[in-house]
Image (cartoon, rainbow, N blue to C red):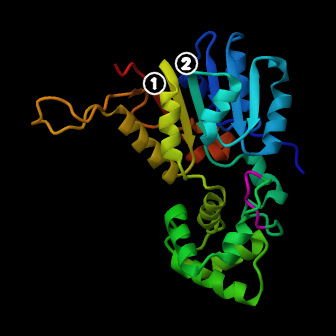
């Protein structure tokens, strides 16, 4: 097992975006190795942090990294979508800031045991963020019907050759169970016309299966709304995304929270009761600097969106 590490993406931009307030309570729903959390706690000696992660190794690594701030943080092995339960356990009513760094960590990609990378040929088809979960990528690849595989590859991977890949996965598993990342990557490559092949041609398939295994998009809209509504007036929610599906959900959810009354203009009074709940801090997503993109390739596809809670009365 590799030691846990995770280089935080757009660290300065995230801290500036959170607009840290004295005595504030901050929620890091994807604590990873604790990089962003460390910077939040370091920014002001009066702030408190509540962190969650599904990965037990991440929680252990973050607890070690955050030791200089003992007494000012609480970490929970939990899914950020269970935020209400976590906040109750932590004794927090309202928050001054929320951070979600969505996607996969550098450590998870590089640790061959985790089976996240198409570049790790001998790695097992695992892809679980929570290793105590019994459901793995091997189950998806070998047990899902062809039509369901096709939909996952098309919808979660935005893979143009989803039909051919799903069909060839089913054919291959009829001969023997597909158990390694290398086997799956080879099937994907063989399914793609030669002129469209590249060293990363399996990336979208692996992304799609990872999303399915971990249910990454399930309930994300509702979670964002709930966390935004957990903010104090003036509090901010910062969300880092790494692929278009996540970013689209964040963009649409922020837009919904920002929208006021939706009643037809001809009505004399509002009957929908909807009120504007947030202001967008950045209308367009923030992207990493060219220097950071050179130093940390993971940051190349990252987008940061920030919204601030307003008084809805």
Magenta stretch bounds: 125-130
Against 61, is 54 above or below? Answer: below
Q: Residue at x 33, y 28 (%)?
A: 276
Looking at the picture, how far across and down is residue 147, in whole percent? 53, 78
Residue ID for mark 1: 308
Looking at the picture, how far across and down is residue 101, in whole percent? 62, 39
Q: Is residue 27 visible?
A: yes
Left or right of 294 in this view: 180:
right
Q: Residue at x 47, y 37 (%)?
A: 225
Extreme residue in the right direction: 1
Question: Which dot, 1 or 2, sits closer to the camera?
Answer: 1
Left or right of 47 in this view: 179:
right
Looking at the picture, how far across and down is residue 11, in whole percent? 64, 29
Residue 108: mark in rendering: none
**Front in this rendered view, residue 117 or 58:** 58
Residue 23 lies in the magenta stretch = no
In which quadrant of the rendered view does residue 8 lie? top right
Left or right of 72 in this view: 225:
left
Local crowd at mark 1 within 10 Å, few (<14), some, or many (≥20)? many
**Front in this rendered view, residue 150 or 71:** 71
The answer to whether mark 1 and mark 2 are in CB contact below 8 A is yes
Q: Residue at x 60, y 32 (%)?
A: 99
Number of numbered discs visible in the structure rendering: 2
**Front in this rendered view, residue 194 or 75:** 75
* Label 2: element kind: loop
* Label 1: element kind: strand
Residue ID for mark 2: 19
Q: Residue at x 45, y 24 (%)?
A: 308
Q: Earlier in the sequence, mark 1 or mark 2?
A: 2
């Amino acid at each position: 097992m590799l030691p846990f590490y995770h280089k935080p993406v757009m660290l300065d931009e995230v801290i500036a975006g959170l607009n840290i307030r004295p005595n504030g309570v901050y929620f890091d729903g994807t604590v990873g190795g604790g990089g962003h959390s460390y910077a939040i706690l370091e920014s002001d000696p009066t702030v408190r942090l509540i962190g969650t992660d599904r990965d037990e190794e991440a929680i252990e690594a973050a607890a070690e990294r955050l030791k200089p701030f003992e007494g000012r943080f609480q970490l929970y092995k939990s899914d950020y979508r269970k935020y209400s339960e976590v906040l109750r356990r932590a004794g927090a009513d309202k928050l001054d800031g929320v951070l979600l760094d969505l996607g996969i960590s550098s450590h998870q990609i590089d640790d061959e045991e985790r089976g996240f990378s198409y570049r790790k040929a001998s790695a097992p088809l695992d892809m679980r963020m929570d290793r105590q979960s019994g459901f793995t990528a091997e189950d998806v690849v070998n047990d899902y019907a062809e039509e369901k595989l096709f939909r996952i590859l098309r919808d979660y991977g935005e893979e143009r050759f989803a039909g051919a890949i799903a069909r060839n996965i089913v054919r291959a598993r009829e001969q023997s169970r597909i158990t390694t990342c290398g086997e799956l990557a080879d099937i994907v490559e063989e399914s793609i016309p030669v002129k469209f092949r590249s060293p990363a041609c399996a990336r979208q398939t692996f992304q799609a299966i990872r999303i399915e295994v971990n249910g990454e998009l399930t309930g994300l809209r509702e979670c964002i709304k709930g966390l935004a509504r957990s903010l104090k007036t003036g509090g901010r929610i910062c969300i880092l995304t790494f692929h278009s599906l996540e970013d689209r959900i964040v963009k649409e959810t922020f837009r919904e929270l920002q929208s006021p009354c939706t009643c037809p203009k001809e009505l004399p009074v509002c009957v929908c009761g909807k009120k504007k709940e947030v202001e967008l801090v950045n209308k367009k997503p923030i992207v990493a600097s060219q220097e950071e993109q050179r130093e940390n390739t993971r940051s190349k596809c990252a987008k940061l969106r920030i919204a601030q809670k307003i008084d809805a009365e």
